[in-house]
Image (cartoon, rainbow, N blue to C red):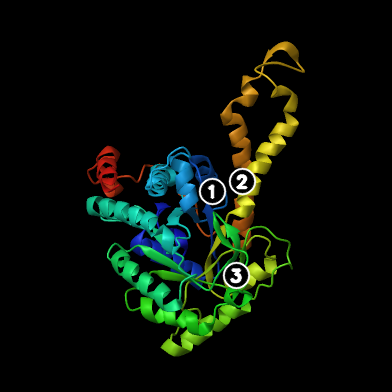
Amino acid sequence: MSLTDIVPPGVVTGDNLLKLLEHARDNGYAIPAVNCTSSSTANACLEAAAKNNSPIMIQVSNGGGKFVVGKSVSDPNAAAAGSVALAYHVRSVAKYYGVPVVLHSDHCAKNLLPWFDGMLEADKVFYEKFGEPLFSSHMLDLSEEPDEENIAICVKYFTEMAKMKIWLEMEIGITGGEEDGVNNEDVDPEKLYTTPEQVYSVYEALSKIGPMFSIAAAFGNVHGVYKPGNVKLSPEKLLAHQMYTKEKISSPLERPIFLVMHGGSGSTDAEISEAVTNGVIKMNIDTDTQWAYWDGLRGFEADKHDYLQGQIGNPDGADKPNKKYYDPRVWIRKAEESMVARVGVSIEKLGSKGKYTKSSEPGEPQCAPDGKSGTIAGIAQKVKKMF
């Protein structure tokens, strides 16, 4: 059965999210998860997904949430407020693009748990009103903590999340490099490779609560940009994790674990392909799309440089206006177009291209799902009270 027949377009949560990720696992493809910091970058991801007939994951980090709310805001709840704001934007426009969209929050270390709590509270408010959470999924990254503590905290949160059918992504084993203020550049190299026993210990604990969880198991991944060959990736280790757990639980599935790949920038096509073959259903993308967004702007400025030196006066005449060049809608669009193309590359590499026939139905906001009563303003008041 095709994905189009089993999952609706727009933001997917709960059972529909599980169906989507099971389809990815069973059909050997992964979905790109792109870090977004604005409505512009989110729209670029949605456009790329629609153009390539693919599902897409839009994710926000702690730093991304702070940026969305405004860098001048120093309130301790700024990251949660900005993350919620981006989620509402995506919910407002996702269905207009006609493909499935997963709303996700990225790495949350132990010191960032108040941010996680803020988003979870927004999920609860939305769930009470509409019967589904605001976000589709959240990630806890407690990989720097002892395994026992990591798993215990995940169990605690997943128990609450499962009540709303929110997906949990967790990390065990450390992704190296630096991203969004989390610096693991000097980590012990041994910790960059998760063992099958570690993965199974997570599966054993979380599967007792529910099926909606995935594991980011380290196999030499490094955040940031690097040339292929500079980092030793071992995607074959992911298959070892699958086989170990499969034997332990006597699963009929070839790939019983939902796995996630972080730090994919600079990975070879062969490494990505092997990781997907071994059960990766989501790959994070940030560094490459950041560059693509900037590169679109850089190219525009280089091409139109002489038209961007003042409001009046350019090579066409000293009295000629330049508004049509410096209008933010012009140069931001060039950045978006470049990012759209780069997300499309990831969609193709991960095998999700063409997996979903873009819906021709009219779009509509998903801020009040299934026509249920309620307004954004009313929910916003409830969210405001929690901060």
x, y percentage for residue 30?
Answer: 54, 65
> Alpha carbon of mark 3 to alpha carbon of mark 2: how far?
31 Å
Q: Earlier in the sequence, mark 3 or mark 1?
A: 1
Amino acid on which the number 1 mark rests in the picture: Cys
> Alpha carbon of mark 2 to alpha carbon of mark 1: how far?
8 Å
Q: Earlier in the sequence, mark 2 or mark 1?
A: 1
Q: Quadrant of the N terminus?
A: bottom left
Mark 2 touching mark 1, by CB under 8 A?
yes
Q: Disc 1 designates what residue?
A: 45
Between tags 3 and 2, which lies in front? 3
Q: Element under label 1?
A: helix
Q: Is residue 138 above or below residue 79?
A: below
Crowding at mark 3 (Cα within 10 Å: few <14, some 14-19, many 20+): some
Residue 345 found in image quarter:
bottom right
Mark 3 touching mark 1, by CB under 8 A?
no
x, y percentage for residue 143?
Answer: 49, 70
Res 344 visible: no
Q: Disc 3 designates what residue?
A: 187
| Image-based side of 361 in relation to 343, left or right | left
Amino acid on which the number 3 mark rests in the picture: Val
User: Mark on residue 339?
Assistant: 2
Res 198 visible: yes
